[in-house]
Image (tube, rainbow, N blue to C red):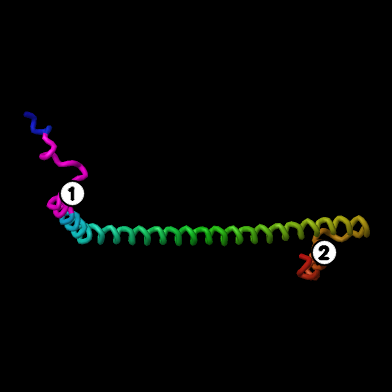
């Protein structure tokens, strides 16, 4: 006779075994206790450290972006000053050429430049 064929001795998958249930519960609680004592602390510390590293990287990136913006603004301001100086120089040259043609005066180039630069310096600051 086959011992597997007897339904009275075979336990079904849905049958409740109180002894097995008790040992599974005890093992589960033991595992939770071991994890709480040895694993959760290091995991939380690791997560805190990771958060600190990410925050520091964000601050470093923010500072770097601010530095880049400040550098760009400074460079733009320098280029603006150079452009204004170049325009003033070209204006002086054009004014000298125009004045020389209109007046047909024999002022030398140095005297003409000084005269026009003096005039430009007297212009209001808002126009330069």
Residue at x 65% of width, y 61% of height = 77
- Please tell me whether mark 1 sits on a helix, a strand or a loop: loop
Which residue does the numbered mark 2 point to in the structure image? 116
Instruction: Give the quadrant of residue 103.
Output: bottom right
Q: Magenta span: helix, strand or loop, mainly?
A: loop
Q: Nearer the viewer, mark 1 or mark 2?
A: 1
Q: Position of residue 36 (x, y in %)?
A: 22, 60
Q: Position of residue 35 (x, y in %)?
A: 21, 57
- Please tell me whether mark 2 sits on a helix, a strand or a loop: helix
Instruction: Give the quadrant of residue 127.
Output: bottom right
- The foreground one among 108 and 64 is 64
Magenta-tinted stretch: 6-24
Which residue does the numbered mark 1 point to in the structure image? 16
Gap between marks 1 and 2, in whole Å?
Answer: 107 Å
On the rendered structure, is 83 left or right of 101? Answer: left
- The foreground one among 119 and 106 is 119
* Quadrant where the C terminus is found in the figure: bottom right
On the rendered structure, is 52 left or right of 23? Answer: right
Inspect the magenta stretch and tell me whether residue 1 lies in it.
no
- The foreground one among 55 and 110 is 55
Marking on residue 32: none
- The foreground one among 128 and 29 is 29
Residue at x 71% of width, y 57% of height = 83
Q: Earlier in the sequence, mark 1 or mark 2?
A: 1
Q: Position of residue 59 (x, y in %)?
A: 45, 62
* Quadrant where the N terminus is found in the figure: top left
Q: Position of residue 111 (x, y in %)?
A: 82, 63
């Amino acid at each position: 006779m086959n011992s597997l064929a007897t339904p009275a001795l075979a336990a079904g998958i849905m049958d409740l075994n109180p002894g097995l249930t008790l040992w599974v519960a005890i093992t589960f609680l033991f595992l939770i206790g071991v994890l709480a004592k040895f694993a959760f602390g290091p995991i939380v510390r690791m997560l805190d450290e990771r958060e600190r590293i990410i925050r520091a990287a964000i601050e470093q990136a923010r500072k770097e972006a601010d530095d880049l913006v400040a550098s760009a603004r400074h460079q733009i301001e320098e280029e603006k000053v150079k452009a204004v100086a170049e325009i003033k120089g070209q204006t002086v040259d054009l004014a000298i050429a125009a004045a020389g043609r209109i007046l047909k005066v024999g002022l030398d180039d140095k005297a003409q430049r000084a005269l026009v630069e003096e005039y430009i310096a007297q212009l209001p600051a808002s126009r330069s």
